[in-house]
Image: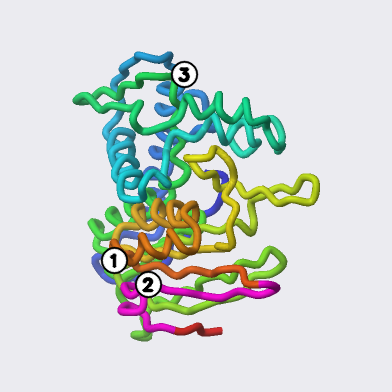
């Protein structure tokens, strides 16, 4: 995934050795990479992406499971989440076949949009089918999915207290040896330094934060985020700087944080409230930031900001 991962756990008599756990985690991540990576031509997803319109191809259960999860997230977010944006990501310079960050023409955007949309995908038994030449990109949920897979394996091997983090998505459960909970910091949306916006305690919950403050480019004095709106085919353009989602499924938290980031401060907050999503929003106001949280978030962690 072009990034790092960290696994912290509390040893107990029934838990295998550190070396064995490390091997188990590496095997899971290697399997995910072989199936889902858009940066290697021999992956299962790239094999599917190379197929022409009207094709069906047997796909591993993992790929089909994530396509189905993406379709649910798309429906739940009124189309703000979309796994088929790779043609758009590429022409903006953010995708694996991107040729430098640049602002494409309106014609190029419309042409790329014709090859996007979950409506063009269909799961038929063990086969995945495409009506047009869509290309899948799982980067918006693969890390969250990987966290859930690693956690499930660790728990099966007897680990009861852990904190697993992969590319910034994380999940924690249990207590540290001193009896204290796992505490994590929700980061303030700053690209010059790392500052905690709020501290939360986790026990069996996954966390994902999406923001526009690290991955972007500037052209002619304007800033272009790597987060694209599937409806417009363009980078988001609103005052939401970052959004954090807490959910028992880290995959769902990962996807929802992306969707809410696309929707923005008003529509995103309204959808999160309507669907009882635990979400924390950081919104640009003048030279500073304001924060808003949903009722579901406040029920878990309380309102207010901790520095």
Verify CB contact (< 8 Å) between mark 2 and mark 1. Answer: yes
In the rendered image, residue 140, in percent from the top left (x then y), is placed at 45, 46
**Quarter of the C terminus within the rendering:** bottom right
Q: Which residue is denoted by mark 1 in the rendering?
A: 276
Quadrant position of residue 88? top right
Give the number of the disc on residue 294: 2
Quadrant position of residue 95? top right
Counting residues from the start of the chain, the first of labels 1 and 3 encountered is 3
Residue occupying the point 31% across, 72% down? 296
Residue nearest the observer in this picture, 78 or 245: 78
Compared to 271, does 129 lie above or below? Answer: above
Residue occupying the point 37% across, 66% down? 246
Q: Which residue is denoted by mark 3 in the rendering?
A: 50
In the rendered image, residue 259, in percent from the top left (x then y), is placed at 43, 52
Give the structural element (helix, strand or loop) at label 3. Answer: loop
Residue nearest the observer in this picture, 267 or 20: 267
């Amino acid at each position: 995934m072009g990034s790092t991962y960290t696994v912290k756990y509390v040893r107990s008599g029934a838990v295998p050795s550190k070396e064995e756990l490390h091997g188990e985690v590496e095997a899971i991540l290697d399997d995910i990479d072989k199936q889902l990576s858009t940066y290697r031509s021999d992956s299962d997803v790239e094999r599917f992406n190379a197929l022409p319109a009207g094709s069906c191809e047997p796909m591993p259960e993992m790929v089909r499971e994530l396509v189905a999860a993406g379709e649910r997230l798309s429906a739940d977010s009124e189309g703000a989440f979309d796994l088929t944006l790779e043609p758009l990501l590429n022409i903006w310079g953010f995708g694996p076949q991107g040729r430098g960050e640049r602002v494409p023409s309106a014609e190029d955007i419309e042409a790329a949009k014709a090859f996007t949309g979950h409506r063009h995908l269909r799961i038929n038994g063990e086969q995945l089918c495409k009506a047009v030449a869509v290309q899948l990109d799982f980067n918006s949920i693969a890390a969250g999915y990987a966290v859930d897979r690693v956690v499930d394996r660790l728990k099966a091997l007897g680990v009861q207290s852990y904190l697993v983090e992969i590319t910034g998505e994380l999940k924690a459960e249990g207590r540290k040896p001193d009896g204290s909970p796992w505490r994590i910091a929700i980061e303030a949306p700053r690209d010059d330094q790392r500052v905690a916006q709020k501290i939360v305690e986790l026990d069996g919950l996954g966390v994902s934060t999406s923001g526009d403050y690290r991955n972007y480019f500037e052209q002619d004095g304007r800033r272009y985020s790597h987060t694209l709106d599937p409806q417009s085919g363009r980078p988001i353009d609103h005052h939401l700087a970052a959004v954090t989602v807490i959910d028992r499924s880290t995959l769902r938290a990962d996807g929802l944080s992306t969707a809410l980031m696309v929707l923005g401060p008003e529509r995103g907050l309204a959808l999160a409230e309507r669907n009882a999503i635990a979400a924390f929003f950081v919104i640009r106001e003048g030279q500073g930031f304001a924060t808003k949280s949903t009722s579901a978030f406040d029920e878990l962690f309380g309102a207010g900001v901790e520095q």
